[in-house]
Amino acid sequence: MSNKTIDQGTGGQSPSSPRLLAQVRDRLRLKHYSLRTETAYVGWIKRYIFFHGKRHPRDLGKAEVEAFLTSLAVERNVAASTQSQALSALLFLYGEVLGIDLPWLDEITRAKKPARLPTVLTREETRALLDGIGQAELHLVASLLYGSGLRLMEGVRLRVKDVDLARGEIVVREGKGGKDRVTMVPQRLIEPLRAQIARARAVHQSDLARGRGEVWLPDALAVKYPNAARAFGWQYVFPAAGFSTDPRSGAERRHHLDEKRVQRAVKAAAQKAGLVKPVSPHTLRHSFATHLLEGGYDIRTVQELLGHADVSTTMIYTHVLNRGGRGVTSPLDRP
């Protein structure tokens, strides 16, 4: 492996300079990666470069990548999923940004993600948790996570046009893996959602009156449909209280409700309800799937509602049906 310095390898450019990182960001945006992924990948690439004394990635190989990943596992004790994300960032750097075909990258051993059973609440615990969220908007978001099986970000990013109260359905756009899917609107949430959409309309009309009212649009829709950003259908069902600056474009717009508010509300409600299980907003989605299976719905239907690409992912929820060890009655309980 070459020991050339960084500057020799880049014509005077440090590998952590804005120029290289800008190339990474530009490529990520061209491929329509989310801002969260962009931030994570750039962070891992910077850590990788600094870990090896600012040597350029062109001068590093399989041994250096493995050393970095091993350090994450041994010294920082990161989770397997975190280590896998770091490797994915490096794969992107070499393959998409530097354009280097390195077959050895495919041979790098990814950390095996341990098989964990999801935390699931009983129906009574779920009811107690939701009852403990007093703020109406946050209560409605949490109720959608459980009642419609939404992920947290799917809930806060919900657009008005994707809620059809007449049909009782929600279209989830660009879910995990970039897939769209359709799920139900619980009947008891139709009126609260109608009221929330009315509040969102009032906020939007106020913004328009002040010469604002634009919302962020995915991909190049803002260019293709110049008026869509101000259309009410594209507004968020759960708009933020104020305006924020888009870190990519610098535009100041009204974004969606901060997901951290939902996370804090769920955590506080779990403590209030005296739940000893580790609870997060995603626990509500786990409980949604579990309770559907307990109610007799077939696993393929639940798979579609959750948006899982493979039924094997959905199969993890069947553990709740295996009472007594895969449905077997303990000999201690036999007459």
Image (cartoon, grey):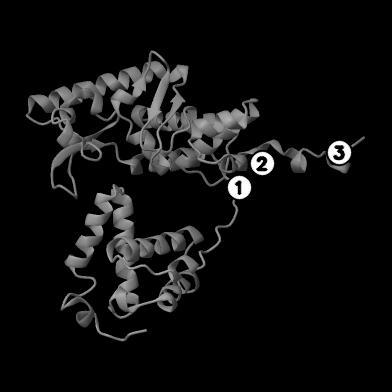
Residue 273 appears anywhere in the view: no
Q: Residue placed at 84% from the left, 42% from the top?
A: 330
Could you say which is closer to the camera, residue 154 or residue 310?
Answer: 310
Q: Which mark is residue 319?
A: 2
Cα–Cα gap, marks 1 and 3: 25 Å
- The answer to whether marks 1 and 2 mark residues whose Cβ atoms lie closer than 8 Å is yes
Could you say which is closer to the camera, residue 109 or residue 320?
Answer: 109
* Residue furthest bottom in the image: 3
Q: Amino acid at mark 3?
A: Asp
- Label 1 Cα neighbours within 10 Å, binned few <14 / some 14-19 / many ≥20: few
- The answer to whether marks 1 and 3 mark residues whose Cβ atoms lie closer than 8 Å is no
Q: Nearer the viewer, mark 1 or mark 3?
A: 1
Q: Nearer the viewer, mark 2 or mark 3?
A: 2
Q: Residue placed at 24% from the left, 24% from the top?
A: 233
* Whether residue 309 is situated above or below residue 294 in the rendered picture: below
Residue 52 x/y as whole percent? 34, 79
Q: Quadrant of the N terminus?
A: bottom left
Secondary structure of residue under mark 2: helix
Name the residue tied to disc 1. 117
* Relative side of 150 to 193, left or right: right
Residue 41 x/y as whole percent? 33, 59
* Relative side of 30 to 194, left or right: left
- Label 2 Cα neighbours within 10 Å, binned few <14 / some 14-19 / many ≥20: some
Cα–Cα gap, marks 1 and 2: 8 Å
Name the residue tied to disc 3. 333
- The answer to whether marks 2 and 3 mark residues whose Cβ atoms lie closer than 8 Å is no
Task: Give the mark, 1 or 3, whose residue is nearer the N terminus.
Answer: 1
* Residue furthest top in the image: 166
